[in-house]
């Protein structure tokens, strides 16, 4: 049960956290909003499915990198809205630089000649 | 519990969050032009499996175990409710085992663990002193107690107690003045009610001036029971006088209902400690600074620890030691309970351990029984378990599931058993107390469950669940998936080999434990039988006695002699009275004196019990003089003759003629002791302890003035009740305040038999329960293995095997573990029976009759229990059996 989803979470883990934190940098959002933002900002490329999104949100909440509040929406519904905490902001910078390193490293591996040429 | 609510709340929130997501997604689709229904289903499709998303999200919370627990419990409940017969049998067995253990624990709790029945009882500490090295000290009641001078020292110089009280427990007094009855009370320091915070419901407690001077304030506080019972709730009793041991005491207060002091024996009255000499004439304990007679209780402020109290009081103890060269005292300080003094604990702890162990054995049998049921059922459940294993459940997960089921069972059994225990044990205890021999004091025991008992019940229940569940769970989760799934389990007879071995081990264990309990009962029964039929060596049927404790009634020697002289003369003249004698101690009255004597030619002093008797004693009681002569009227004047018992004479002068031999009392105060000359030898009799004929025992002639504390012995014909009435009447006409109760010497034996009877009854009940459980275990195992091997039996029968032979085979298989269990049980009991024989009821630890008859009985019972289900083998129809399953 659930093996399919769990595998995906593990694959996405680092990056999904980064995407969520980055999305929340622009302001508080609810779960659906976060998934739509990621999709729109990635040019409809990245589809975050709910089975990955909600565990990630709850885990980040537990780690106190994001906070959550219940708000009333325009159509009088209770909505759980996530926001970035100070710790999350710090985490985001760390994650970003790590991502930077990883993508540079991967880029280097993928284009060895270019790198040699540069040096 | 809080976690549970928290969990519920988060569960709800997650649900709301996901619903919101779905609605938003649907709205988005509608805005793009989809129809509402389509939009909704599209949103759902995109979202995926809602339940699964929830589950993986919940995993993040780290409460997976809680969820699993609920799931296991739900599943377990369903499984259990599907097998009502199994569930009922298991729950009942556990309820029985846990119930009696919780019950006996609540009794022990009431005796020794519960704090005192006073307000803020946790602040009350009991102080005891323990003397190291050999210290010469006068002891009354308990060696760890204090003298009055020591008490005053501790009271006035400690810095830790808000109040320190002292009291003499178990003070016996005769209530006089028309209400003649024996009472037990306490002599208390005058801050008693103050420190305990138990102010009398009516009137007042003691004030300091009541204790100002010895013998000055004859006041008394009586218990609510005494007031309501004997005095019929007389509202005008306050301020009136009642007579205690001939001393008129003014009633100043009536204690609060339910307050009966701080000892197991309920107090009927409290008098100031300074009235000691007046209430127990002839003894001056108050001014003896080397006398242990007062128990100390102190109340501390909430912030003071026991260590601080110990440190503070030890300073005082060390200072007192300095004025007693050679004395080293240490203090034992503990929260006060009804039974808590070191000497009481010394007695209670081994007794309680034996009792708890015996009750624990029954629980053990119940556990083995349920284990066996679980094992048997596990082989039926093989397929289900194999299925779960093959679906990827881990073995640990499965063990947890099975253990959860066991815990559910034990919880149900534990709750049921505890409820039964709470409900019934007060009644049982009441019944036992009501059947104690006459003259046994009222006990103040609170058997109601408190936190300690509940904690014990819970711990026992959990332990039980794990104890009977763990082995079957481990066993049944270790499966060969292939064979199990193919359903070959039924083909291989009674399950796999290891399972069968385990079941046999459990049956053997049950039988072994049951054997120990039954053998113990058998030994005790034999001991009781011996005690009942024992010839004490003197005439118990035609001799009666009454105790004349004139000393405590304030008689002096002259008055006592006059009173006893007239009483004896007039009793001797009564019709039916054959002879009247007097002795310092009546046979089996449990009222002995002993001393050490110097025997010429021996370095060691010899301890002997002694009795001062009148010349008529031997013929009245019916103890023959076998050598020499009895006492004569003037013996007490002419030197000091002595009469030994046969075995005493033999042990002092083996192979010699004891007549004319000389021995001495031990020297006192530097003076040599009196010389004694042996003039006669009396036949052995168990005058001191029932069943013990060879006590070292010596008789001395009583002076006719030795009347202040004696037993009157009457040899009579006819009815003891008539005799009692006539003697009472005579006594009343001589002195209205002397209580008289004439009883046969036979009744003295009852006191010795009563504990034996209680212990035997208790172990008999336990043995019966154990037998029942063990037989159910044997029956269950045989009937299970027969039903599992129906197919095998069918094949054998079809091949022409004889029905009775097949049954014989089944029986032999069933009896093998029983036999082994029997042997282990007998060996085990032989090893522990010294415990029983040390309880001394004339009990032989290796009584051959018990050791033969009990195993035979148990084997026969087990044979019957296995024969009944094994008989079914005979009725197996091969055709039906081969189609079976």
Image (cartoon, grey):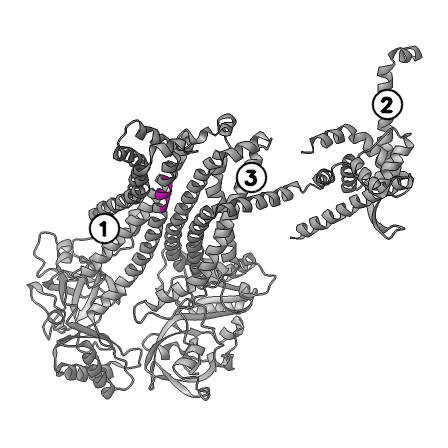
Closest to the camera, between mark 2 and mark 3, is 3
The answer to whether any part of residue A111 appears in the image is yes
Q: CA distance from mark 2 to mark 3?
A: 46 Å
Q: Residue at x 32, y 54 (%)?
A: B763
Q: Is residue B682 left or right of residue B5?
A: left
Answer yes or no: are tags 1 and 2 on the same subunit. no
Q: Helix, strand, or loop for circle 2?
A: helix
Q: Nearer the viewer, residue B661 or B465?
A: B465
Q: Horizontal and vertical percent for residue B228?
A: 43, 81
Chain name for mark 2: A
Q: Nearer the viewer, residue A91 or B4?
A: B4
Q: Which residues are magenta?
A: B776-781
Q: Disc 3 marks which residue?
A: B400
Q: Disc 2 marks which residue?
A: A103
Q: Residue furthest right?
A: A118
Q: Residue B792 lies in magenta, yes or no?
A: no
The quadrant of the image that shows the C terminus of chain B is top left
Q: CA distance from mark 1 to mark 2?
A: 91 Å
Q: Quadrant of residue B672?
A: bottom left
Q: Is residue B316 above or below residue B854?
A: below
Chain name for mark 1: B
Q: Disc 1 marks which residue?
A: B844
Q: Helix, strand, or loop for circle 1?
A: loop
Q: Residue at x 35, y 43 (%)?
A: B779
């Amino acid at each position: 049960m659930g093996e399919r989803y769990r595998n995906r979470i593990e694959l996405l883990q680092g990056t999904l956290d980064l995407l969520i934190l980055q999305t929340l940098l622009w302001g508080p959002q609810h779960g659906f909003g976060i998934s739509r933002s990621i999709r729109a900002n990635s040019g409809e490329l990245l589809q975050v499915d709910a089975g990955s999104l909600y565990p990630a949100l709850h885990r980040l909440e537990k780690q106190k990198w994001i906070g959550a509040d219940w708000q009333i929406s325009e159509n009088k519904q209770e909505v759980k809205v996530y926001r970035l905490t100070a710790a999350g902001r710090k985490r985001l910078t760390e994650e970003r630089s790590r991502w930077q390193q990883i993508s540079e490293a991967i880029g280097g591996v993928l284009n060895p000649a270019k790198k040699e040429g540069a040096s | 519990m809080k976690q549970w609510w928290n969990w519920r709340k988060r569960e709800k929130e997650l649900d709301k969050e996901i619903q919101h997501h779905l609605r938003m997604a649907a709205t988005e689709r509608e805005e793009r032009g989809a129809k509402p229904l389509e939009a909704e289903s599209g949103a759902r499709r995109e979202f995926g499996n809602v339940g699964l998303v929830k589950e993986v999200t919940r995993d993040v919370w780290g409460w997976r175990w809680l969820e699993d627990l609920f799931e296991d419990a739900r599943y377990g409940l369903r499984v259990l409710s599907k097998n009502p017969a199994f569930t009922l049998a298991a729950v009942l067995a556990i309820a029985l085992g846990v119930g009696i253990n919780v019950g006996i624990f609540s009794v022990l709790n009431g005796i020794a663990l519960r704090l005192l029945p006073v307000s803020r009882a946790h602040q009350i500490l009991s102080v005891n002193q323990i003397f190291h090295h050999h210290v010469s000290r006068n002891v009354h009641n308990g060696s760890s107690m204090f003298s009055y001078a020591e008490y005053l020292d501790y009271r006035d110089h400690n810095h830790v107690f808000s109040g320190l009280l002292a009291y003499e427990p178990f003070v016996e007094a005769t209530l006089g003045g028309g209400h003649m009855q024996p009472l037990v009370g306490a002599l208390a320091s005058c801050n008693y009610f103050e420190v305990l915070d138990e102010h009398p419901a009516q009137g007042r407690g003691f004030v300091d001036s009541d204790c100002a001077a010895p013998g000055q304030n004859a006041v008394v506080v009586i218990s609510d029971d005494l007031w309501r019972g004997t005095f019929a709730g007389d509202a005008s009793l306050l301020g009136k006088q009642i007579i205690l041991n001939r001393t008129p005491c003014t009633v100043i207060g009536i204690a609060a209902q339910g307050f009966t002091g701080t000892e197991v024996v309920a107090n009927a009255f409290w008098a100031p400690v300074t009235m000691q000499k007046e209430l127990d004439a002839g003894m001056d304990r108050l001014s003896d600074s080397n006398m242990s007679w007062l128990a100390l209780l102190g109340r501390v402020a909430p912030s003071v620890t026991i260590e601080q109290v110990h440190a503070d009081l030890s300073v005082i103890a060390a200072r007192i030691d300095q004025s007693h060269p050679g004395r080293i005292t240490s203090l034992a300080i503990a929260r006060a309970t009804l039974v808590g003094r070191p000497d009481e604990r010394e007695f209670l702890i081994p007794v309680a351990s034996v009792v708890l162990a015996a009750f624990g054995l029954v629980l053990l049998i119940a556990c083995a029984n349920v284990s066996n049921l679980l094992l048997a059922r596990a082989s039926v459940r093989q397929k289900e378990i194999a299925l779960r294993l093959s679906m990827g459940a881990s073995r640990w997960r499965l063990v947890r599931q099975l253990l959860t089921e066991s815990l559910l069972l034990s919880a149900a059994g534990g709750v049921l058993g505890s409820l039964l225990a709470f409900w019934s044990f007060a009644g049982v205890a009441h019944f036992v107390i009501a059947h104690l021999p006459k003259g046994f004091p009222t006990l103040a025991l609170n058997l109601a469950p408190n936190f300690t008992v509940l904690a014990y019940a819970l711990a026992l229940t959990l332990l039980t669940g794990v104890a009977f569940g763990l082995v079957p769970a481990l066993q049944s989760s270790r499966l060969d998936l292939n064979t199990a799934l193919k359903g070959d389990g039924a083909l291989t007879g009674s399950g796999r080999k290891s399972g069968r071995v385990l079941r046999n081990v459990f049956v053997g264990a049950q039988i072994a434990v049951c054997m120990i309990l039954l053998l113990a009962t058998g030994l005790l029964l034999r001991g009781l039988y011996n005690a009942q039929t024992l010839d004490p060596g003197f005439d118990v049927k035609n001799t009666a006695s009454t105790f004349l404790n004139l000393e405590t009634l304030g008689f002096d020697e002259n008055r006592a002699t006059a009173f006893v002289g007239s009483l004896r003369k007039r009793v001797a003249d009564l019709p039916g009275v054959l002879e009247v004698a007097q002795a310092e101690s009546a046979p089996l009255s449990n009222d002995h004196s002993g001393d050490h004597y110097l025997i010429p030619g021996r370095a060691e002093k010899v301890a002997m019990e002694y009795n001062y008797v009148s010349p008529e004693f031997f013929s009245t009681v019916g103890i023959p003089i076998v050598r020499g002569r009895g006492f004569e009227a003037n013996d007490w004047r002419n030197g000091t003759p002595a009469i030994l018992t046969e075995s005493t004479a033999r042990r002092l002068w083996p192979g010699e003629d004891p007549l004319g031999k000389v021995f001495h009392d031990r020297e006192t105060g530097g003076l040599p002791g009196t010389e004694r000359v042996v003039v006669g030898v009396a036949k052995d009799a168990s005058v001191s302890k029932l069943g013990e004929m060879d006590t070292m025992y010596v008789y001395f002639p009583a002076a006719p003035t030795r009347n202040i504390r004696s037993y009157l012995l009457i040899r009579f014909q006819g009815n003891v009740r008539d005799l009692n009435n006539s003697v009472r009447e005579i006594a009343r006409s001589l002195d209205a305040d002397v209580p008289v109760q004439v009883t046969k010497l036979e009744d003295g034996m009852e006191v010795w038999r009563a504990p034996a009877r209680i212990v035997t009854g208790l172990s008999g009940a336990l043995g019966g329960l154990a037998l029942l459980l063990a037989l159910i275990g044997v029956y269950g195992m045989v009937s299970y293995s027969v039903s599992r091997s129906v197919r095998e039996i069918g094949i054998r029968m079809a091949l022409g095997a004889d029905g009775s032979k097949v049954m014989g085979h089944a029986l032999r298989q069933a009896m093998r573990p029983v036999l082994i269990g029997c042997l282990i049980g007998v060996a085990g009991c032989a090893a522990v029976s010294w415990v029983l024989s040390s309880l001394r009821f004339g009990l032989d630890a290796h009584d051959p009759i018990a050791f033969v008859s009990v195993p035979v009985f148990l084997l026969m019972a087990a044979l019957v229990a296995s024969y009944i289900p094994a008989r079914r083998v005979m009725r197996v129809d091969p055709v039906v059996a081969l189609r079976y399953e």
